[in-house]
Amino acid sequence: MSTKAAPPVEKNEYIDVVFEDLTHEGAGVAKVNGYPIFVPQALPDERAKIKVIKVKKNFAFGKLMELYETSPYRQEAPCLVYKQCGGCQLQHLSYEGQLKAKEKQVRDVMQRIGNLPDVPVHPVLGMENPWLYRNKAQVPIGEHEGGLIGGFYRQGTHEIVDMKSCLIQAEENDVLIQRVKEICSKHGVSAYREEQHKGTLRHVMARYGLVTGEIMLVFITRTAELPQKAAIIEEITAAFPQVKSIVQNVNEKRTNVIFGDKTKVLWGSEYIYDYIGGIKFAISARSFYQVNPVQTKVLYDKTLEYAQLSGNEAVIDAYCGIGTISLFLAQKAKHVYGVEIVPEAIEDAKRNAALNGIENAEFAVGEAEKVIPAWYKQGIQADVIVVDPPRKGCDEALLETIAAMKPKRVVYVSCGPATLARDLRYLEDHGFRTVEVQPVDMFPQTMHVECVAWLERKEA
């Protein structure tokens, strides 16, 4: 009876390696006799000494000890807490290097998972300024030496790294949250203590409208009451006239989930407003709204380009969220049907359509893989189908329906290149041809990359 060979490395062993790739989490990959070792902060083409810190049957983890040869794309990370914080993975890689790594990631999965080596994958559409882009800041709150702290969790822990500013968040949100911590500390608001399930303030969230300049502040509390609420609101609104909405969300449960079920407006409006292109959006505390509006416009422009609408088409938008893509499409389509599983998102989609005077878009609540087949049975035919699924990709029932409906084209917007490649393979095997794939960098300084794929129906 044959036994599988033991791993070629041992825990606490020091070895010299050359890195050949990056994982989807941004760690460098080195191989010893084909056995992969994942090492944070390492880059492809670098030669280094590492220490093996954890050995598994099929892979190991290591720690970077000494660099002998560095990548031409290596840079000093500008963030002071980069190595402690888990928010970014790639600040030590130049932006040019990041875009190349993301393009390679997409090309690799197209070949390895999709078996589509000949599909054109374009260079990633990056940002002119790949910093300070996130319009939503959501920070856990803790206590240290009698005052409130807030920031991100240290990698792999629930220990809060306090920070005054974050290089990928909008400065407006950073300044507000820093001041909110000071004001709440002064008024004796206690931080939530996870172990004891005691204390009041769990998280603070700020949402910023890039075009309008409007800000929403959300207190997420364990308790129904926020102590010294009136005094806190008065100080915040006096210091920040751009704050248009202050909201409280109550989460009484012992859970890692950020939001609870109860949300109430403490001051101002229930919504702030922002624009993507010419479309205006109402954003509530719980609305899904893309965190990088600059690149969202780039992503949606490409989606519209690939849809090739002349004004006569019926379009289905699966996984439509609050209607962001649907409303872009409605400007050029005859009619758009949007479907989304979250009822609140569909309410937002209808509100956003009304806000923009768009009457040729209608929205339904439900699972795309159930609603769209029902539409098909009712005789609704789509010339173009747009899908923007979660990271797990499209449900197979939806892919089967797309194949049965035979639209002229499919535009697939993806936040997970691996599941995109898998689903493209299915559609290729069921009557479609992938024309090209355009990656878009929505999240600079991280390994995430979004893609838009354009598919045409193969002629009989």
Image (spheres, rainbow, N blue to C red):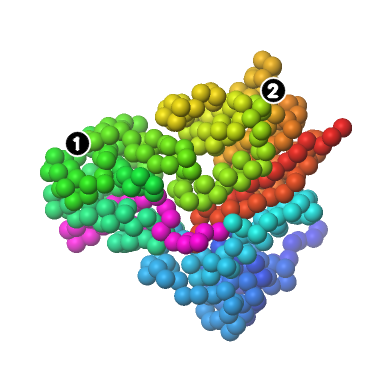
Of residues 236 and 209, the one nearer the viewer is 209
Res 72 → quadrant: bottom right
Query: In the image, residue 382 lies at what x, y percent?
Result: 68, 26
Q: Which label sits in the foreground, 1 or 2? A: 2
Q: Name the mark on residue 186.
A: none
- Can residue 396 be seen here? The reply is no
Of residues 85 and 183, the one nearer the viewer is 183
Residues at circles 1 and 2 in contact by the CB criterion of under 8 Å: no
Q: Name the mark on residue 381.
A: 2
Query: In the image, residue 403 lies at what x, y percent?
Result: 75, 31
Of residues 456 and 75, the one nearer the viewer is 456
- Whether residue 199 is situated above or below residue 131 in the rendered picture: above
Give the residue furthest to the right: 460
Question: Which residue shows up at 56% across the image and 43% down it?
Answer: 300
User: Magenta segment, which residues?
Assistant: 126-153
Q: Residues within 10 Å of mark 1 (few under 14, many from 20)?
A: few
Say what amino acid the circle numbered 1 marks.
Glu
> Which quadrant holds the N terminus?
bottom right
Q: Name the mark on residue 225.
A: 1
- Can residue 81 be seen here? The reply is yes
> Which quadrant holds the C terminus?
top right
What kind of element bears circle 2?
Answer: loop
- Whether residue 24 is situated above or below residue 202 in the rendered picture: below
- How far apart marks 1 and 2 lie (CA) works out to 51 Å
Question: Which residue shows up at 33% across the image and 35% down it?
Answer: 271
